[in-house]
């Protein structure tokens, strides 16, 4: 018999609870969209960080996808600083 588990997403596998997985999924999606937008900006990473109002090391964490280091509130604030509109869409599981 196999004890293999299957998961809907990597976040489901990493999280201890469904609630934690939900937070990780939302933060990850927001971080991905934010990074896609920022990639289009001209200038250095230092200038991009300044435009967002964060330090260069914090920008590096954002750019490298360190979702564990950013709260949902922080990511919403960064999206607003990037002139992005954050909206929410809920679906029944």
Image: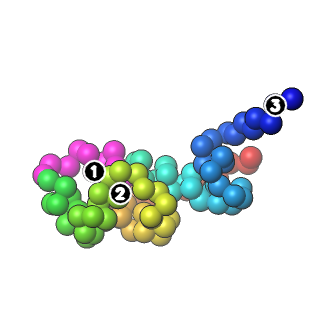
Q: Locate the N terminus and report the quarter of the image it occupies.
A: top right
Q: Residue furthest left?
A: 43
At x 57%, y 51%, the residue is 25
Is the residue under label 2 in contact with that under label 1 (CB below 8 Å)? yes
Rendered view: 29 above or below 53: above
Is 92 situated left or right of 49 in this image? right
Q: Residues within 10 Å of mark 2 (few under 14, many from 20)?
A: many
Q: Which residues are magenta?
A: 34-43
Question: How far apart in space, not on screen, are marks 1 and 3 (Cα)?
Answer: 44 Å
User: Badge 1 is on which residue?
Assistant: 38
Q: Secondary structure at mark 1?
A: helix
Q: Residue at x 44, y 64 (%)?
A: 69
Asked whether 87 or 3 is in front, the reply is: 3
Alpha-carbon distance for marks 3 and 2? 38 Å
The x, y position of residue 53, in whole percent, is 25, 70
Q: Position of residue 82 (x, y in %)?
A: 30, 60
The mark that comes first in sequence, 1 or 3, is 3
């Amino acid at each position: 018999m196999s004890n293999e588990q299957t998961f809907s997403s990597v976040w489901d596998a990493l999280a201890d609870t469904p609630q934690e997985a939900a937070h990780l999924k939302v933060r990850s999606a927001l971080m991905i969209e934010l990074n896609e937008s920022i990639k289009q900006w001209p200038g250095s990473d230092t200038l991009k960080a300044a435009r967002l109002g964060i330090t260069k090391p914090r920008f590096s964490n954002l750019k490298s996808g360190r979702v564990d280091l950013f709260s949902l509130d922080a990511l919403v604030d960064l999206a607003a600083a990037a002139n992005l509109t954050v909206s929410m869409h809920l679906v029944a599981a």
